[in-house]
Amino acid sequence: MTPVSAPDVDLTALIRRWQDGDTDARERLMALVYDRVRAIAAQSLQRQSGSTLSPTELAHEALLRLLGAEASWVDRRHFFHVVAQATRQVLVDRARKRLSDKRGAGAEPLPISEAEGLGRTDRDEDLIRVDEALSVLSATDARQARIVEMTYFGGFSREEIAQALDTSVSTVDRDLRFARAWLKDALSA
């Protein structure tokens, strides 16, 4: 999966024009990247069984966060990394909200016979634990955390990650192995 649907278009130039206030550049950029953002959302949701979001809803929420952010993206690679981060944030925020709702949040108790989706609680808690562990990992090894995020929340291939981080595929593989082992230890504690 390539980050650009039209290889002859310079997304970096569109990003810069948008940051300079060109709203037409923003619209063109969103039209060009929408399919890729939706694909990122679909891949993230495949890893999050039980999610109530559709790929389209997740893509829209992630893009809305991007449009509302005061970010300064360096280039298209950075842009798609931020898309993976926004996707992660949407999923984690949704999981936190569902957990809050299940723990009361001012609602009246629901009879167990009417409770739907209670099995999602464990998945929501797991997602939040992974998010917190990734934040800790990021403080000690930001590249490893980015690789995990781009793999699991962005759906990027190893080659795309290597290109985005300006490193080799073997370095991505090694960092991903170490990060997975670190996360496994962190999550089992």
Image (tube, rainbow, N blue to C red):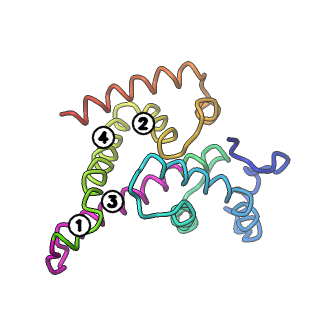
Question: How many neighbours does mark 2 have within 10 angstroms: few (below 14), some (14-19), or many (20 or more)?
Answer: many
| Number of the front mark, 3 or 4 | 3
The residue beneath circle 2 is 145
Q: Looking at the rendered structure, which numbered label has been put on residue 100?
A: 1
| Number of the front mark, 3 or 2 | 3
The amino acid sitting under disc 4 is Ala
Q: Looking at the rendered structure, which numbered label has been put on residue 133?
A: 4
Mark toward the start of the polypeptide (1 vs 3) = 3
The amino acid sitting under disc 3 is Ala
Mark toward the start of the polypeptide (3 vs 2) = 3
The amino acid sitting under disc 1 is Ser
Residue contact at pointers 1 and 3, CB within 8 angstroms? no
Residue 7, by quadrant, is top right
Asked whether, in this view, residue 17 is left or right of residue 189, the answer is right
Residue 129 x, y percent position in the rendering: 27, 46
Mark toward the start of the polypeptide (1 vs 2) = 1
Residue found farthest to the right: 8
The boundaries of the magenta stretch are 84-111
Element under disc 1: helix
The residue beneath circle 3 is 95
Residue contact at pointers 3 and 4, CB within 8 angstroms? no
Give the residue drawn at x 70%, y 42%.
2
Give the residue drawn at x 29%, y 30%.
184
Residue 77 x, y percent position in the rendering: 64, 43
Mark-to-mark CA distance, 1 and 3? 9 Å
Residue 94 x, y percent position in the rendering: 37, 63
